Structures are given as C-alpha cells and as structure tokens.
Image: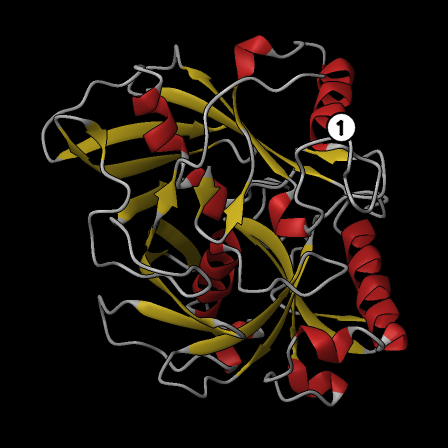
Amino acid sequence: MRGGTSKGPFLDLRELPSEPDQRNDALLRIMGSPDKKQIDGIGGATFVTSKVVMVQPSSRPGIDVDYLFAQVFIDEAVVDTKPTCGNMMSGVGPFAIEKGWVNISGKETTVNVYNINTDSTAEMVVKTDDQGVNYTDGDFKIDGVRGMGAPILMRMKGIEGGATGKLFPTGNKKDIILGTEVTLFDAGNIMVHMKASSFGLTGQETGDYFLDKLDLMDQFESIRREIATIAGMGDVSKSVLPKIGILSAPSNGGHIRSLYFTPKTLHPTHAVSGAVCVTSAGMCEGTIASELLVRPKENETCILEHQAGKIPVELQTSMNGDKFVIDSAGTYRTARKLMEGFVYY
C-alpha cells in the first residue's frame, strides 16, 4: 500500500515470528536488506519505500487494531521499531477494513488504532461505500503524490513522550550541543530541532544540496548522537531516532518551514509525525520552533512548509498550570492499495 508519501508491505502481525529477532530477520529478507538495491526483496531502495506496517486485531477496550511500524535499513541489517510513521499509518484504517476486522458503517468508517511504537492512539476516519474502501473517489491532494484521492482523517492522542516518556527529554526547552542551540522534542516523533541560520542555511535547500555536504551532515549527526546520549537514549548510531528538523520561518503562506532528515538523508517531502512534532513544538513558548513559527489564530490549522509543498496539522493544545499539553493532533492523508498477495522469506 501507499500511505501518504511512503509505501511498503502491510502485514498481519500474527503471521510473523513473535520473537523480535526472528521477526526482524524475516522483515530483512522480505525487503531485501542489506543491499543498496534491495534486489532480493520487495523494498524500493529508498528510505520512504523501505517501510513495513504490521497490524493485528486488538484486545484493548475501545481499540480496533494494534499497529507496529518498522523502518528497515537499506544497506545495513537493521530493523528499527522505535519510530512511528504517520504517512504509513494512514493506510492502517483501510487495511483493517480490507481484512474484515472493522465493519463498514456507511460513507465513513472510523477505525480506532493503538500505536505500539509510541504507546498512543489514533482515530482514523476512512471514506467507504458498499464495495469497501474508497481510495480514489475524491478531490483531496497531498504534496508529493501525483493525482487526487479520498481524504483519510487521522486524529492522534497521547502523543507526548512516545519515545522517551518526556515531552522535553533533556528537561530543557533548549540546549547548547557542540556549540549549536537545539530543542529535543518528543511528540508524535522525537526530533532534534535546529535553526537553518545556525548553519548558514536559508531553509530553502533541496536534497541535492546536501549530497556533497559531508562535513555538514557529519555535524548534524554528531549533534544528534550527543543530545540523544544526554537524554538517556544511549548510542543511536543504529537508530533513526531522534530525527532532525532544520527549521526556518515560512516563505509560502504557511506557519513554519522544516527540512526533515531521516536522519542521514533529507526526506523528499516530510513525515506527518515530524510535522506534528514541529508544529506542536512551535506552539510551546521557549522552544526553537516557537521562535520561527508565525503563530496561527486560535483553532486555526497550523501549516508546515517543506521542500515539496505543505502539510496541514490541526492542533489542540492547552496549558495545565505551567505545563504545556498537546490534547490532540490531526491531519489528512490519502492512501491506496497497490497489490494483494503473498510475500516469501
């Protein structure tokens, strides 16, 4: 399935080995890793096409399905289940309906999802009809995907501290790491936020710009590893978390601009979970993002700009005394079933 601006296999979690190391070995074989071309598997040999979604019916009260995401490294034998992926999660609702785990309830069917990666929940509203999931009959477009489709609404709750248990894993809204001012923020996804201007960048750079900027990329990586260690995450050299966001003021009618690194390459568009992280951090005074965000009016959708377009995020935030609270975060994506069958490992 394509989910948002990513794609990969959607699997019944129960059909995979229950022991994590055995399951990871199966996913490596399914995707064809480690191999830069993933010749012996069905991976697409890019970061956004080497992703796997695993789903099963849930026994949790009020929840329809449990969702586990895996980022499969391309040229290393690594499967990372610490992060989540909002783009791929947009396909979880349709997948659950396709499998018959959730009954169709008219023109819209709600699927309640538990995200194993982040210990959070999401409500997904999927367009349906008598024939099943309506993927293509709609005029909703997301930047980075050709054509239009039926919108899928995702409302995420309980997203604070999904990776570390803390919204601010270092205990600070800003830190100085290797001479650079940063914010480590854990909501939707955990990211290191840094200003583009701190590196002499404008924020308008594209992926090609960074291909030969090895010293700059090494600087990003050194900061990422150092702050992860300070936050108690240990050695993250073999993990995609925390991700990196190089932030700047908006330039095209949005509220903030972000270059999203995955973390060693620039994402061709932007992760949905990362958009939630950046925009919600922007609503919290004292963070790097808050200094760049053109603050939207009350109840206004917060629009994140990226190199391929924009992502709207519907945020509900509040203050509990002096504590910043993210009540919910929602956005729209599209998804499409590409094929159905068996994959062998």
Pointer 1 local density, CA inside 10 Å: few below 14, some 14–19, many at least 20: many
Type of amino acid at the residue the image marks with label 1: Leu
Residue 222 point in image, percent of width and height:
86, 63
According to the image, what is the colour scheme of the structure? secondary structure
Looking at the image, residue 222 sits to the left or right of residue 48; the answer is: right
Q: Position of residue 286 (x, y in %)?
A: 53, 73
Is residue 159 at least partly visible in the picture? no
Name the residue rendered at 53%, 64% in the picture: 269
Q: Which residue is mark 1?
A: 28
Q: How many marks?
A: 1
Q: In the rendered view, does 120 fall on the left or right side of 61?
A: right
Q: Is residue 104 above or below residue 82?
A: above
Query: Which of 74 and 232 lies nearest the eye of the viewer?
Result: 74
Residue at the image point whose x is 50% and y is 72% from the top: 308
Instruction: Write the residue at 39% across / 78% down.
Output: 255
Q: Position of residue 288 (x, y in %)?
A: 58, 74
Which residue is pictured at 25% across the width and 58% down the height? 140
Horizontal side of 90 relative to 277 (left or right) equals left
Q: Residue furthest left?
A: 106
**What kind of element bears circle 1?**
helix
Quadrant of the image occupied by residue 121: top left
Relative image position of residue 6 (x, y in whole percent): 53, 48
- In this picture, is 165 found above or below 297? above
Q: On screen, 241 above or below 172?
A: above
The answer to whether residue 72 of the structure is visible from this angle is: yes
* Above/below status of 71 relative to 307: above
**Foreground pick, 22 / 164:** 22
